[in-house]
Image (tube, rainbow, N blue to C red):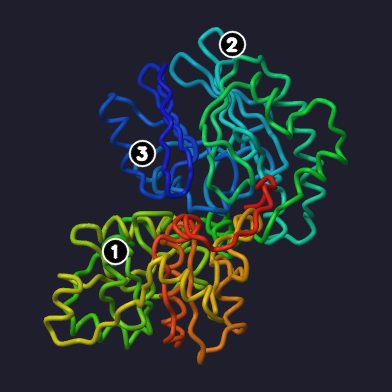
Amino acid sequence: MKIEQIYTGCLAEAAYYIESNGEVAIIDPLRDVSPYIDRANRNNGSIKYIFETHFHADFVSGHIDLAKKTGAKIVFGPTAAPGYDAYIAKDEEVFPLGNVFIKALHTPGHTMESSCFLLLDENKKEVAVFTGDTLFIGDVGRPDLVQKVKADVTPQILAAHLYNSLRTKLMVLPDDVIVYPGHGAGSACGKSMSKETTDTIGHQKQVNYALEASLTVEKFTDKLLDGLVEPPQYFPANVILNLKGSVKSVDDVVKAGTQALSPSEFSTVWESLNALVLDTRKKEAFSAAHIPGAVFIGLDDNFAPWVGTLIPDLNQAILLITEEGREEEAVIRLSRVGYDNPVGFLKGGMEVWIAAGNKVEVLAQITPGDFERMFSGGSIEARDVRRKSEYDTEHIEGVENFPLDFINKNLSSLNKEKTYYLHCQGGYRSVIACSILMSKGFSKVVNVLGGYKELAQTNLKRTQFHKQNTEL
């Protein structure tokens, strides 16, 4: 028996490869399915099942493409009603896989169809449980996402279901059963996940706040809902895509998105399709020279979640600026969160754009030391674009919070005639924020190099709350 966790850091998502005697099961695959097929081929295995723990909100699943390419059966838990061919398991139904078995456990709470999959060895002893978004390491799935799609399923209703599911299906398992969750720290599907990506049931019962034996359902619900903030705006759209299955083949998305365009072709497509120019290079390269109007979201950080958070329309035509050779990576990572309309990339990048005589823009930047002198010496408009939870924990006194997560909602609070100095924790998010403001006509924006990490080393007065970070 072989178990492999396939972890994608950008989405903090874990898919799973399980193999026994030549038969393979995949749990919660991402959109680009070649890694799963390649693993099976290397091991002379055949993919028999694709288990989906629920209709995901934070990414578009690859189960449909994977089923088409392998003939594997898609399996959901009870109450799921997908708009495509899939097998709906009964609670505690057992699926043979080589010499082992996988049992479906219906665990509503994160969503109504949420299910865990319990791995049994050849003697039907419990070995591991794949918990999806029901149980994380140190946390459990948030119960407020379904309401964005179905208003009458309230967080309180789902929290009560989750309380029951945890206590009747998971906490009763043997303490040595390994927990393999669907996400780790950084995912917006929970609020306080551990950086660890596996544990045991026994240890989680000791350290996970949601598994505290003495909790009543009322206290559990209060703890679960405390500190939740608005989920990323793309979540409901991804749920619908996973529910209906109305997505293009990822191969078609890649083919369209990796069309190489000359500067003149790029400009023509940009104008004719009213496309968004998305610059995915390193933040330093974007700051030094970029196409006027381009939005920066770099590939070398949490690219896909920030795309989903900041680009409102999943159908938006997107033109890409990438480092050489990374255009396919950019398209695939866009597709993971449902952005299926990239229409090409600038062949040769900024060098050919500049060589063709096209205009470029530079992002103004200052050092933390210069910021300290200017901020201490007078009245300048500074904004901290970190999340509210980060800001509440510690910030520079006199600097207002302007979270990147909600920048599109809060643009009206800014004045285009003023100059704004923006910082985040390390510099990535503030460059994103500056690029968005510049693309919206704010010409007087300045990025503070190094972010709060560097500003905290200056003599600027800081406010520290030292409260536990329980917010997304």
Q: Nearer the viewer, mark 2 or mark 3?
A: 2
Q: In this orientation, which residue lies closer to the viewer: 298 or 65?
A: 298
* Amino acid on which disc 3 is placed: Thr
Q: Are marks 2 and 3 in contact (CB under 8 Å)?
A: no
Q: What's the distance in space between the residues labelled 1 and 2, CA to CA?
A: 49 Å
Q: Answer whether residue 92 is visible to the viewer in this image.
A: yes
Q: Image quarter for residue 169?
A: top right
Tell me the tag on residue 70.
Answer: 3
User: Circle 3: is it few (<14), some (14-19), or many (20+) Cα within 10 Å?
Assistant: few
Find the distance from the CA under tag 2 to the CA under tag 3. 29 Å
Q: Position of residue 292 (x, y in %)?
A: 32, 83
Q: Residue at x 46, y 86 (%)?
A: 442
Q: Position of residue 135 (x, y in %)?
A: 64, 35
Instruction: Identify the amino acid type marked 2.
Output: Lys
**Position above or below: 212 against 55:** above
User: What mark, if any, has residue 281 been given in the picture?
Assistant: 1
Q: Earlier in the sequence, mark 2 or mark 3?
A: 3
x 69%, y 31%: residue: 208
Amino acid under disc 1: Arg
Disc 2 secondary structure class: loop
Residue 421 image position (x, y, % from top left) = 48, 75
Q: 401 or 6: nearer the eye?
A: 401
Residue 343 placement (x, y as % from top left): 31, 72
Give the mark, 3 or 1, whose residue is nearer the N terminus: 3
